[in-house]
Image (tube, rainbow, N blue to C red):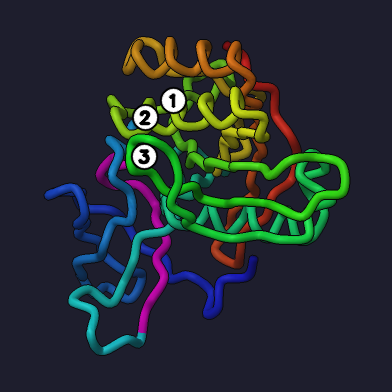
């Protein structure tokens, strides 16, 4: 995935009201940008951090800039936009970068399903040998110093709901996949953040026992673009 145009650089002043951030651009201009991330952004919203933004020419937008990337350590860039992983995973499937999800002739996005009023991120169908695959994509940005990525970075009632919905589909004979999209390259595995949301961790383990598949793929991000690179182990 190529960012067109290339992202603008700046320095973070503060993130506030969940969806807003004040940033000083490299040009010296101070702007307010939309923050496309509903989580706590643990470790990714430190004032003074180097950041990069996209710019929209849509005149209907209140904030023309969207915060996309942050440098959390020298040479370590993290993608914070939670809308990007669905596109990256779809692109990865279509380009053959996710072997576990190959062979499907149909791909639909945001399909209503389940008993709790959910929408599945990606619904794959038309495989010659496998049932439909319900794929729920999660953006992973948090990590600890020993190279372990963590999800979620805040209590996620919605995330636990999605796991229950997936588990029900698995028990009905469908493929159900939770796919962690890790937008940083300094980690080696993904684990549930039990210290942050123990219910999510418990629900994930129960879902895996009920037949849900857990995948994790790393993403290399830069101001020029983003792409899936390799699979990471999910350790529960």
Residue 76 visible in the shown view: no
Q: Which mark is residue 102?
A: none
Instruction: Give the CA distance from mark 2 to mark 3.
Output: 26 Å
- The answer to whether the residue labelled 3 contacts the one labelled 1, judged by CB atoms less than 8 Å apart, is no
Residue 190 screen position, x and y as percent: 58, 23
Task: Between residue 165 and residue 100, name the one nearer to us.
Answer: 165
Q: Position of residue 13 (x, y in %)?
A: 21, 53
Q: Measuring 25% from the left and 65% from the top, which residue is drawn there?
A: 33
| Front position among marks 2 and 3 | 2
Instruction: Look at the image and tell me in which quarter the C terminus lies.
Output: top right
Q: Residue furthest toward the front?
A: 172
Q: Mark 2 vs mark 3: which is more N-terminal?
A: 3
The quarter of the displayed image where residue 107 is located? bottom right
Asked if the magenta segment contains residue 78, the reply would be: no
| Crowding at mark 3 (Cα within 10 Å: few <14, some 14-19, many 20+) | many
What residue did someone put label 2 on?
Answer: 161
- CA gap between label 1 and label 2 equals 5 Å
Q: Is residue 141 left or right of residue 197?
A: right
Closer to the camera: disc 3 or disc 1? 1
Q: Nearer the viewer, residue 13 or 161?
A: 161
Residue range of the region highlighted in magenta in the rendering: 44-56
Residue 46 placement (x, y as % from top left) = 29, 40
Q: Which residue is the site of mark 3?
A: 44
């Amino acid at each position: 995935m190529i960012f067109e145009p290339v992202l603008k650089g700046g320095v973070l002043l503060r993130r506030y009201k969940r969806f807003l951030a004040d940033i000083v651009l490299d040009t010296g201009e101070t702007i307010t940008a939309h923050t496309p991330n509903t989580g706590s952004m643990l470790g990714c919203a430190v004032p003074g951090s180097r950041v990069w933004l996209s710019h929209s020419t849509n005149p209907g937008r209140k904030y023309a800039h969207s915060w996309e990337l942050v440098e959390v350590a020298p040479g370590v860039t993290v993608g914070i936009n939670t809308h990007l992983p669905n596109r990256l995973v779809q692109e990865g499937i279509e380009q053959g970068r996710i072997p576990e999800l190959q062979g499907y002739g149909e791909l639909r996005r945001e399909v209503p399903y389940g008993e709790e009023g959910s929408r599945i991120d990606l619904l794959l169908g038309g495989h010659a040998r496998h049932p439909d695959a319900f794929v729920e994509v999660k953006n992973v940005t948090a990590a600890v110093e020993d190279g372990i990525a963590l999800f979620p970075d805040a209590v996620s009632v919605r995330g636990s709901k999605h796991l229950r919905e997936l588990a029900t589909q698995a028990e009905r004979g469908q493929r159900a996949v939770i796919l962690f999209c890790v937008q940083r390259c300094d980690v080696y595995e993904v684990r549930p953040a039990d210290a942050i949301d123990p219910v999510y961790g418990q629900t994930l383990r129960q879902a895996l026992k009920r037949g849900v598949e857990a995948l994790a793929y790393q993403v290399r991000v830069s101001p020029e673009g983003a792409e899936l690179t390799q699979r990471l182990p999910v350790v529960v």
